Amino acid sequence: MSVVEIKGVTKTFAQGNVTALENIDLELEPGEFVSLIGPSGCGKSTLLRIIGDLTPPTSGTVTVNGKPAKQARGDGDYGIVFQDAVLFDWRTVAKNIALPLEMLGWDRDKRKARVETMLDLVELRSFAEHHPWQLSGGMQQRVSIARALAFEPALLLMDEPFGALDEMTRERLNLELLSIWEKLGSTVVFVTHSISEAVFLSTRVVVMSPRPGRIAGHVAVDLPFPRTVETREEPRFFELVTQVRELLRKRGEHLLPEEAAELL
Amino acid sequence: MRRAREWAPALVVFVFVIAVWEGSISAFHIQQFLLPRPSEIVKTFWTARHTLWPAGWYTFKEALGGFFIGSALGMVTATVVGRFKNFGTAIMPIAIAANAVPIIAFAPIFGAWFGEVSPHSKIAVAAVLCFLPVMVNTLRGLSSANPRQIELMRSYAASELEIWRRVRVPTALPFVFTALKVASVLAMIGAIVGEYFGGAFNALGVLINSDAQIFDFVTAWAGILVASLLGLALYGAVAGTERLVVRWAPDTRGA
């Protein structure tokens, strides 16, 4: 059974009569790490939000774990990470990670044990009692990932989670994310506009084109796991990056110059 | 130790101002009734303690009553207004316009409504003074929740009540306390000025007013000192509560 099944999803925004997404079909198998990549305005974030039932589609259906997206949201079937860490300043790191567990009604002892596991996973154990504003941007995002994974959702939705971080932090978190993913085996939908990040992380890259948002093509990433710093230097890595770039360029002839530049 | 260093400059300035005050009265032969010496004021603060201090306490209770009633009404109104958007759009322009009205001008009218001598009219003035800043700030606080945080809560299938409790209220708290600190000062002003238009014979505003009329300015100044100390106490109590409740906020540290 697919973890996510998107059928004929179209999204138009009444304001300005914009078609953000047109007739999207996409299926995600369990354990896949799928990146959605495309220039601004291709609807990749909108698609992610539709999967999470945070925005309704204008038409079409989305099922998550075989259930309608709305029910899946109610059942806590996915965790989500935004571009900003979106932590609650009034909660400590530990309490931030415990938030979804509180919402799911876990008792105190169970919450405590899980929070400790998650703190170890993202290597922030000694920061449990700190407040978010005492942490660096990269650490905050790790807390956000720990929170999203705390209740072991089958699906992890990530909306440009490392977009606001510097290059070095970003590459380190890429590695950390992969090792977490390999440990937990969740299915991941990862929105990004970095080609190398998409190729490095994913088992499959879904390339999207804008106005209206459509799927331009899929690139299966056959780089072996575990991926390391050296992976980025392999010839196969460059081939795949080129393949994604070509797809973006072919579909992107009508791109605005700055959108095209963003992808190169 | 760090605290002492933070307070030291203010203390130095304070001592300096008092010294200049004291010194210039001797140097320029300023008449006692125009500006009494600080040492005289402090002396009267002590010698007249049997009238001034109970009067201060009486007025402080009025201010406190007005502070609690006005602030509570402000918070409740903001909560209701924040919940119903249409009501909010109807009431906000009026609230902002009302904020510009010099409410203290209503003091004689409140005297007519709630009894000129009765403490109720002073409580009313203080309450009305406190109400608007608390309401406007609470409303601003409740509506400045981060939309992403709300979205995150929705991803957990949180109800509106849950979002209110776990996101909106904690976000609003620093705003509310800022308003409460302003209100604590306004409450004391409201009670004293209310008493200038008439009140019980043992009320601080009445005493200051009558002492000034009989040219007993030293006692009037001592009364003002009592009022200031009580105003500071109320402000300090609110600020202390803020430190306890909003322990997490990065900007309450050292501010």
Image (cartoon, coloured by chain):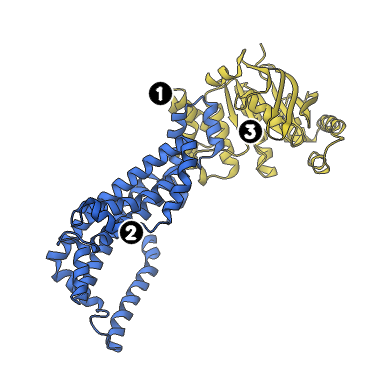
Chain colours: A yellow, B blue
- Left or right: A77 with respect to B25? right
Q: Position of residue A38 (x, y in %)?
A: 76, 33
**Amino acid residing under circle 3:** Glu
Q: Are marks 2 and 1 on the same chain?
A: no
Residue at disc 1, secondary structure: loop
Residue at disc 3, secondary structure: helix
Residue at disc 2, secondary structure: helix
- Residue wearing tag 1: A107
- Residue wearing tag 2: B104
Label 3 vs 1, first from the N-terminus: 1
- Distance from the alpha carbon under mark 2 to that under mark 1: 53 Å
The quarter of the rendered structure image containing the N terminus of chain A is top right
Circle 1 Cα neighbour tier, 10 Å, few/some/many (<14 / 14–19 / ≥20) = few
Q: Position of residue A255 (x, y in %)?
A: 83, 37
Q: Chain of mark 2?
A: B
In the rendered image, the vertical position of residue B240 relative to residue B152, given as above or below:
below
Residue at point 27%, 87% (across, down): B26
The reply to whether discs 2 and 1 touch (Cβ–Cβ < 8 Å) is: no
**Amino acid residing under circle 2:** Ile
- Distance from the alpha carbon under mark 3 to that under mark 1: 29 Å
Q: Position of residue A16 (x, y in %)?
A: 71, 35
Say which of marks 3 and 1 sits in front: 1
- Distance from the alpha carbon under mark 2 to that under mark 3: 62 Å
Q: Position of residue A26 (x, y in %)?
A: 73, 19
Say which of marks 2 and 1 sits in front: 2
Q: Chain of mark 1?
A: A
- Residue wearing tag 3: A176
